[in-house]
Image (cartoon, rainbow, N blue to C red):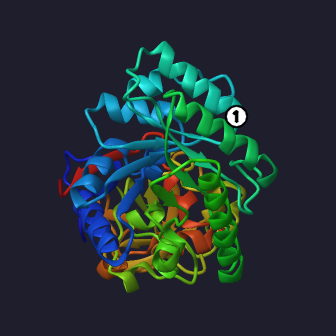
Amino acid sequence: MTALPVDGPFREAVIDLSAVRDNVATLRARIPSQFYLTVVKANAYGHGMVPVARAALAGGATHLGVADIAEALALRAAGISAPILAWLHDPHEDFIAAVSAGITVCVSSVTQLDAVAHAGAAAGLAPEVPPTVHIKIDTGLSRNGAADTMWGALFARAAELEVAGSIAVEGIFSHLSNASVEDDLAQAARFETGVALARDAGLAPTIRHLAASNAALTLPQLSFDMVRVGIATYGISPDDAVAPHDYGLRPVMTLRGRVAAVREVPAGTGVSYDLTYRTSAASRLALVPIGYGEGVPRAASDRGPVSIGGERFTVAGRVAMDQFVVDCGAHAVDVGDEVVLFGDPANGHPSVADWAAATNTIGYEVVTRLGGRLTRTFVGA
């Protein structure tokens, strides 16, 4: 049996920052783009935004990416000076704090362009250092980004503001659907059309970016000037057809806890709410103090894989808010033994992909939803 230190956390996510550094370095070495952006939005996909950002930069990332300005400002408050892109904004955002902190604002409308230009003036930025923007265009995902019917007006206004010294258009970008190689290549063609139109309007973006994790790994011809790598940073697959270890990547997070109680029960004993599980023989039941309050999906009831003492078991019965039960059968198990929900398969642990398959979701959601009373322990710094 393997016990966690008695003075250690009751339930924890162990974040291996050396794996972040190594994964970034490995990916950077295989990707032909000049610049490399690590996505650390949503608390670095549940891994811890600031420590992961520092590790990614140490591994060779040149830029960081977040969804919103609050995340970008948190990175600046932590002393991180690298270029940061933020791309999803409140309709009423005034952008003054962002441009004052040197955040690169990603815009997808004339309204946003004008707001950023106004923010630069309000913040008192010198004409030689206007706010930096990247223009996002929609090439087929139908989410954030300017529709092609808006490109002409958007590019014309951006050029006008740039000539006036109110903004600097550093980049232009879009996002792929990953529906198929054919769909992604078709989007790439539309992206190149958009870049050409931007240049015709008088813009000269030096950073074109389209590929996220999946395309960065499988379609290097779409790397352009920069790639935005999110989930692959964490050693998690962006697609069922992509195995991270095939690219030299290793998992960053291990989710584990300690057995809180053990009881021996006879055959036919019902377990947890609704008694959806009953023991088929005399068994030892181990109580694990992690539940949906920490983000473990209730869909893992009767399905989620765990490792105790090097043996693989399955969650028995309903996952509750604070806990779940594991039927260990005749295997020896003691209070305090380590329980690993997921980690590195090379160590015999279930993977994030195993949990995604068991709960009918994707690896992104498995790690990003973790929180509650969970302690994050950072190692390998």
Identify which residue is drawn at 54% across, 50% down. Answer: 369
Measuring from the top left, give residue 243's x and y in whole percent: 46, 82
Considering only vertical position in the picture, is 295 above or below 326? above
Circle 1 residue:
110
User: Dot 1, how many residues are within 10 Å of its Cα: few (below 14), some (14-19), or many (20+)?
Assistant: some
Residue 271 appears in view: no
Left or right: 248 as drawn, with respect to 287: left
> Which one is nearer the viewer's eye here, 38 or 6?
38
Measuring from the top left, give residue 320's x and y in whole percent: 59, 50
Left or right: 228 as drawn, with respect to 176: left
Residue 239 appears in view: yes
> Which one is nearer the viewer's eye here, 221 or 26?
221
Q: Secondary structure at mark 1?
A: helix
Q: Amino acid at mark 1?
A: Val
Considering only vertical position in the picture, is 373 above or below 39? above
Left or right: 184 as drawn, with respect to 236: right
Measuring from the top left, give residue 152's x and y in whole percent: 74, 47
As drawn, the residue found furthest toward the right would be 149
> The N terminus is located in which quarter?
bottom left
Identify which residue is drawn at 39% across, 49% down. Answer: 64
Identify which residue is drawn at 36% across, 69% down. Answer: 251
Q: Quadrant of residue 351?
A: bottom left
Measuring from the top left, give residue 85's x and y in whole percent: 46, 43
